[in-house]
């Protein structure tokens, strides 16, 4: 059954588009379906940075790495204090793990949402008395401001302050951690940046190529870039 068939069947039963996309995702992520969810959940200026980082982290598979050290679309990690708060988020809001749940968790960390807040110390007070778990006010503010600046800045800052894909240390089981040479650390950051900016450029090109919708035979306003 194709996505169109699934959506048609869902709409006939009175189910919304977002719910049917969740069903379509199944165990293997799908680029187009994750794109639909991101557009529903995040503000427009976050679309490209979020999608570019997901593409690099998990190739749009929300079950990537399940049961391992890093899991999901964003590769939540124990040492970055995301996995445990995410489990609490699911329990508190009576949600199942899914692409949608992972995306709303990240949105609520960045923007705050009292309706899905935590009843414990993973909460912190942000702007306008909103509540956001885990990430810290400085990082959240930096990421939101970067989204507003533009897609390249947003992609870079989200990578550096949320994903943090590069470690300064080498971990070998049974041995003491060893710090990498600064030159190696710099090379790894540069490589991650180039990969994600490449993905981001692809999304920018995709959105720019989308046809402008028409209303009553007249062209609407040109579609603004994320």
Image (cartoon, rainbow, N blue to C red):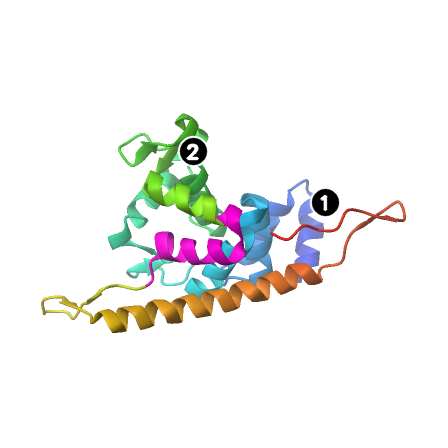
Give the percent coordinates (x, y) of residue 186. Answer: 30, 69
Using residue 182 as the reference point, say whether residue 128 is left or right of it: right
Give the percent coordinates (x, y) of residue 70. Answer: 32, 59
Q: Does dot 1 land on a helix, a strand or a loop? A: helix
Q: Nearer the viewer, residue 140 or 94?
A: 140
**Label 2 neighbour load within 10 Å: few <14, some 14-19, many 20+:** some
- Label 2 vs label 1, nearer the camera: 2
**Image quadrant where one finds the N terminus:** bottom right
Look at the image and give the residue range highlighted in magenta: 147-165
Q: Is residue 163 magenta?
A: yes
Q: Is residue 179 visible?
A: yes
Q: Say which residue appears at 43% left-offset and 35% top-offset.
A: 112
N-terminal of the pair, mark 2 or mark 1, is 1
Tell me the residue that label 2 is attached to: 116
Give the percent coordinates (x, y) of residue 166. Answer: 30, 64
**Label 1 neighbour load within 10 Å: few <14, some 14-19, many 20+:** few
Q: Is residue 98 above or below residue 54?
A: above
Residue 12 numbered tag: 1
């Amino acid at each position: 059954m194709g996505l169109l068939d699934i959506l048609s069947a869902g709409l006939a039963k009175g189910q919304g588009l977002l719910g049917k996309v969740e069903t379509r995702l199944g165990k293997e992520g799908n680029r187009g379906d994750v794109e639909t969810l991101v557009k529903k959940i995040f503000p427009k200026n976050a679309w490209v940075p979020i999608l570019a980082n997901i593409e690099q982290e998990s190739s749009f598979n929300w079950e990537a790495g399940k049961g391992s050290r890093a899991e999901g679309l964003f590769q939540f990690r124990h040492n970055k204090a995301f996995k445990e708060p995410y489990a609490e988020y699911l329990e508190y809001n009576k949600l199942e793990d899914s692409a949608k749940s992972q995306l709303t968790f990240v949105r609520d960390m960045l923007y705050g949402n009292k309706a899905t807040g935590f009843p414990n110390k993973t909460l912190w007070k942000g702007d306008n008395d909103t509540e956001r778990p885990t990430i810290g006010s400085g990082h959240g503010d930096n990421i939101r401001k970067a989204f507003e600046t533009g897609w390249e800045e947003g992609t870079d800052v989200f990578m550096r302050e949320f994903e943090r894909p590069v470690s300064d240390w080498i971990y070998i089981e049974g041995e003491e951690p060893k710090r990498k040479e600064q030159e190696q650390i710099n090379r790894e950051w540069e490589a991650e940046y180039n990969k994600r900016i490449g993905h981001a450029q692809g999304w920018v090109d995709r959105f720019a190529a989308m046809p402008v919708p028409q209303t009553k035979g007249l062209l609407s306003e040109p579609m603004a870039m994320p």
